[in-house]
Amino acid sequence: MDKSLSVTQSFVKLPKVFKGNKHYKGLSSDAKIVYSYSLDTLQLSKLNHASDGTWFDYEHKQHFIFYSVVQVMEDMECGKQKAINIRKELEKYGLWEMKSQGANKPTKIFVNEIIPSQAPKKPLRYTVKPRKEVLGVTVDGKELTDYAEVF
């Protein structure tokens, strides 16, 4: 057995709700990947900075991340215009909300929760607690009844 394969690998989850959901039919696969990266970054920010509130915007009552055009270019191995288009696409579909802080300051990105029963242009706070209800979405022939099953 090759010992190099035993190295721990890290993975990013891609939400299953993208599969077969009519609201996200036009969303590019690149945007889905960047959204998954941003969810991962948001979770790390929440874990690492939970006590000091560094990554929490008290005005919006929501955690945020910084995800620059350059970072998108590096993660997706693409050019500047494509990275800009991916960021705009995520905002168009309501998956991100970008708030400029002014000149020479990074843009705050609020990562919004995906709930299959909502239209994508109605961004929801990431801190919304899931409700138990029939979602009206089927994945692999099974109807989802809990938001936790989406991820």
Image (cartoon, rainbow, N blue to C red):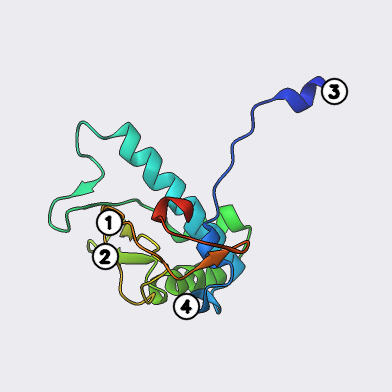
Residue 100, numbered label: 2
- Kindly check if marks 2 and 4 are in contact, taking CB atoms under 8 A apart as contact: no
Q: Given the image, on which type of amino acid does mark 2 rest? A: Ser
Residue 49 in view in this figure: yes
x and y, in percent, of residue 83 in the image: 52, 66
**Residue at image point 25% right, 63% down:** 103
Q: 126 above or below 49?
A: below
Could you give the CA–CA distance between mark 3 and mark 2, rounded to whole angstroms? 48 Å
Q: Which residue is mark 4?
A: 23
Taking depth in this image into account, of 64 and 94 the one nearest to the observer is 94
* 99 to 26, vertically: above or below: above
* Residue contact at pointers 2 and 1, CB within 8 angstroms: yes
Circle 4: residue type:
His
- Identify the mark nearer the N-term, 1 or 3: 3
Q: Is residue 151 visible?
A: no
Instruction: Tell me the number on the disc at residue 105.
Output: 1
Q: How many marks?
A: 4
Residue 131 placement, left or right of 147: left
The crowding category of the residue bearing disc 2, from other C-alpha atoms within 10 Å (few below 14, some 14 to 19, many at least 20), is: few
The residue that disc 3 covers is 2
Label 2 to label 4: alpha-carbon separation:
27 Å
Residue toward you, 142 or 129? 142
Circle 1: residue type: Lys
Task: Name the N-terminal-most of marks 4 and 1.
Answer: 4
The answer to whether marks 4 and 1 mark residues whose Cβ atoms lie closer than 8 Å is no
Which label was assigned to residue 20?
none
